[in-house]
Image (cartoon, helix red, strand yellow):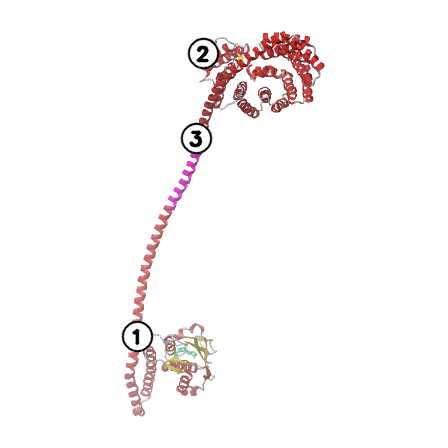
């Protein structure tokens, strides 16, 4: 069914509300005078022009209002966005009220776009409501629903309770009349009714409650319908005359009447509808009266009061024709046909039926035409929607690009920052590397220099060693040659000195005798020195093969060699022969070694103490450790190493004979076998000489 037809035949309070909401939307319109103001003051002149446009709108002089608004639109487009957008809204309302829906939508969409550019949306919500209303009118309920929801979202954001109440009501209205989806209608009407707006009781709250009765009636919940109808009646009766009390009471009673009719409480319905007509009469609201008369006619038919029914329908028909309310006219014609038929006046009934059929045909064709024009409008709408979507998408794309560019900028900046850090770090590392390379190079050069110095020093040391070795070798050679070669002339001196003494001793005076004594003694001393020196220098010159030597037997020989000395001082030489090992070596070496140490032990005896020398040997893992212990005068701590050097003599040279070569020779022998010699002693408490020789040691090549 055409929405307007549905509107006309729908429950009365809803129609009133629709008109009321419609009025709310269009109240801000003006008068239709061609404005001739001061063009320099665009702002104040635009304000005046808008007021005039509002006046024209109120007088329903839409065409004049449109002309004025178009002028405002042109004047304010560039300079005054606020007035420009107001002119767009008012133009949209004017076009909608003149059923030019395409233009109306065009202006609503332009308003939304304009508000997007200035980032405000106070008027956008009105545009959404306007668009939703037009879609609803054109039968595109899904789109209408979408736009109502868009408006609701904005209104919720802005906490615009009045706007929300209207939007919920409009949605309920659409579901009630156009979609015939009463349950959904009830949901939205309830939401609308639940919103309390302080200081706004009056007609609006009546309308909200009044909408619920007919909706419950459609659902079939007649008790609830009655409850709400009664509540609406109470509210209406509390209204003042100025608030529209009579019209409200007319509709409240009409609704009570229809519910009673549904409940088959015909008397109640009759009285309610009659009262309703009376209130409409007072309010001079003929549309309401037409509807109530038709319902009353229906009640009369049901009660069999056919005459009254015909009167009611006739009255309604008359007013419908006058008010051009086609659908109510059709109801009246059909009602008359039924009443006449029931009265047996078939001819009259047929006449009214024919009229009704004709009217219905014209209505349907009008409806078809309207549908066709709606299709066209819908097509244009879709195109407009698509254009708007395109613009929106383009805008979103631009925004996304902007966001992306911003993000990219951040990323670039981030990358740049990271790159800068890396670069700084790289430069820093590079410079550090260069510096450390330079330092390294300097250090290397220094090391090189030091190495060269070291090498030079090593070379020098090597050279000195070579020189030293050469000198040592020369010295040893010299010592050997000297001791060897000097022995012969010394022997000559000694022999001839002794011969002269023996032959001419009795002719010597005391001086000659003493002088000869010195000569012989010096010769003996020199001989001893030369012997010791020769022994020393011979050690590493001997190339004899190593023999297996029984050190016990070597010691026996030594003891035998020293018999004269031991007897002289009553010395005891105690050898632990059981422990004496067999070693690989040169006999002379071991004889010299033991003889030097043992003879020292006897020689450096303590006053009044018979010398005792104890010789032992301990076998260790890798060494043979000999010990030669005496009970002599001992050796001071600080001289323990020095005594092994050549020509060292610690004691009185007249008291203790010697050359200071004996222990140096011992050391040289031990070194020759890669062994070790040392002394442990305390002054006055005797000394113990230790000789450690490797078991498998081979003589040094030196
Ligand atoms: P010499 O015995 O010919 O003096 P040595 O080289 O044998 O030379 O000894 C060097 C010095 O070491 C000795 O002059 C002496 O002072 C000290 N000395 C060596 N053996 C002993 C010992 N058993 N007791 C005390 N002093 C000693």
Mark number for residue 7? Answer: none
* Residue 440 highlighted magenta (yes or no): no
Q: State the SS at label 1.
A: helix
Confirm if mark 1 falls within 8 A of ligand 1.
no
Judging depth in this view, the residue of 9 and 61 nearest the camera is: 9
The spot of residue 607 in percent (x, y) is: 46, 82
Q: Residue at x 37, y 50 (%)?
A: 436
Neighbor class of circle 2 (other Cα within 10 Å; few <14, some 14-19, many 20+) is few
* Residue 403 highlighted magenta (yes or no): yes
Q: Which stretch appears magenta? A: 400-429
Where, quadrant-wise, is the C terminus in this rendering?
A: bottom left
Nearest to viewer (mark 2 / mark 1): 2
Q: Is residue 107 visible?
A: no
Neighbor class of circle 3 (other Cα within 10 Å; few <14, some 14-19, many 20+) is few
Neighbor class of circle 1 (other Cα within 10 Å; few <14, some 14-19, many 20+) is some
Q: Residue at x 55, y 12 (%)?
A: 361
Instruction: State which tag comes first along the sequence, 2 or 1.
Output: 2
């Amino acid at each position: 069914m055409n929405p307007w037809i549905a509107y006309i035949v729908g429950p009365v309070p809803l129609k009133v509300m629709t008109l009321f909401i419609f009025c709310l939307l269009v109240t801000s319109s003006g008068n239709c005078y061609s404005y001739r103001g001061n063009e320099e003051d665009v702002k104040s002149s635009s304000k005046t022009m808008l007021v005039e446009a509002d006046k024209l709108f109120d007088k329903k002089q839409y065409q004049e209002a449109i002309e004025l608004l178009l002028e405002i639109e042109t004047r304010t487009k560039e300079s005054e966005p606020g007035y420009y957008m107001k002119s767009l809204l008012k133009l949209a309302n004017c076009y909608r009220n003149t059923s030019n829906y395409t233009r109306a939508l065009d202006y609503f969409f332009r308003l939304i776009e304009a508000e997007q550019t200035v980032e405000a949306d106070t008027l956008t919500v009105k545009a959404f409501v306007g668009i939703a209303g037009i879609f609803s009118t054109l039968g595109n309920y899904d789109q209408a629903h979408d736009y109502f929801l868009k408006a609701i979202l904005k209104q919720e954001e802005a906490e615009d309770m009045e706007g929300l109440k209207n939007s919920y009501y409009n949605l309920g209205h659409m579901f009630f009349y156009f979609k015939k989806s009463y349950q959904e209608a009830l949901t939205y009407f309830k939401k609308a009714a639940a919103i309390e707006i302080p200081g706004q009781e009056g007609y609006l709250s009546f309308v909200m409650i009044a909408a619920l009765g007919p909706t419950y009636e459609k659902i079939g919940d007649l008790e609830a319908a009655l409850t709400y109808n009664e509540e609406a009646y109470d509210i209406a009766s509390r209204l003042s005359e100025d608030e529209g009390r009579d019209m409200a009471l007319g509709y409240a009673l009409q609704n009570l009447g229809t519910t009673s009719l549904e409940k088959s409480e015909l008397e109640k319905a009759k009285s309610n509808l009659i009262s309703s007509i009376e209130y409409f009469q007072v309010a001079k609201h003929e549309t309401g009266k037409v509807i109530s008369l038709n319902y009353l006619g229906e009640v009369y038919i049901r009660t069999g009061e056919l005459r009254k029914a015909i009167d009611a329908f006739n009255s309604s028909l008359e007013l419908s024709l006058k008010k051009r309310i086609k659908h109510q006219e059709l109801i009246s014609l059909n009602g008359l046909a039924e009443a006449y038929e029931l009265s047996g006046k078939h001819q009259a009934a047929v006449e009214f039926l024919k009229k009704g059929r004709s009217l219905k045909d014209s209505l349907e064709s009008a409806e078809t035409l309207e549908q066709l024009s709606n299709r066209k409008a819908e097509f244009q709408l879709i195109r407009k929607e698509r254009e708007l979507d395109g613009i929106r998408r383009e805008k979103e794309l631009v925004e996304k690009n902007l966001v992306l560019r911003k993000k990219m900028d951040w990323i670039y900046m981030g990358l740049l920052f990271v790159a800068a850090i890396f670069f700084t770090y790289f430069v820093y590392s590079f410079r550090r590397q260069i510096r450390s390379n330079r330092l390294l190079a300097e250090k290397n050069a220094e090391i090189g220099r030091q190495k060269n110095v070291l090498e030079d020093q090593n070379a020098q040391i090597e050279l000195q060693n070579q020189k030293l070795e050469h000198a040592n070798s020369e010295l040893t050679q010299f010592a050997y040659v000297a001791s060897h070669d000097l022995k012969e002339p010394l022997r000559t001196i000694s022999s001839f000195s002794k011969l002269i003494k023996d032959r001419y001793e009795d002719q010597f005076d005391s001086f000659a005798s003493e002088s000869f004594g010195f000569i012989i003694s010096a010769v003996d001393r020199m001989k001893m020195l030369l012997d010791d020196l020769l022994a020393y220098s011979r050690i590493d010159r001997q190339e004899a093969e190593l023999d297996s030597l029984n050190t016990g037997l070597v010691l026996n020989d030594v003891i035998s060699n020293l018999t004269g000395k031991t007897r002289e001082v009553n010395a005891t030489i105690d050898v632990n022969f059981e422990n004496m090992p067999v070693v690989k070596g040169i006999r002379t070496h071991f004889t010299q070694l033991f003889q030097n140490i043992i003879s020292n032990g006897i020689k450096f005896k303590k006053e009044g103490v018979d010398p005792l020398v104890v010789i032992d040997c301990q076998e260790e893992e890798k060494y043979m450790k000999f010990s030669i212990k005496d009970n002599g005068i001992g050796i001071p701590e600080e001289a323990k190493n020095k005594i092994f050097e050549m020509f060292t003599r610690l004691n009185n040279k007249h008291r203790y004979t010697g050359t200071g070569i004996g222990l140096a020779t011992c050391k040289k022998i031990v070194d020759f076998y890669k062994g070790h010699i040392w002394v442990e002693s305390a002054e006055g408490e005797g000394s113990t000489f230790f000789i450690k020789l490797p078991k498998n040691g081979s003589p040094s090549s030196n």
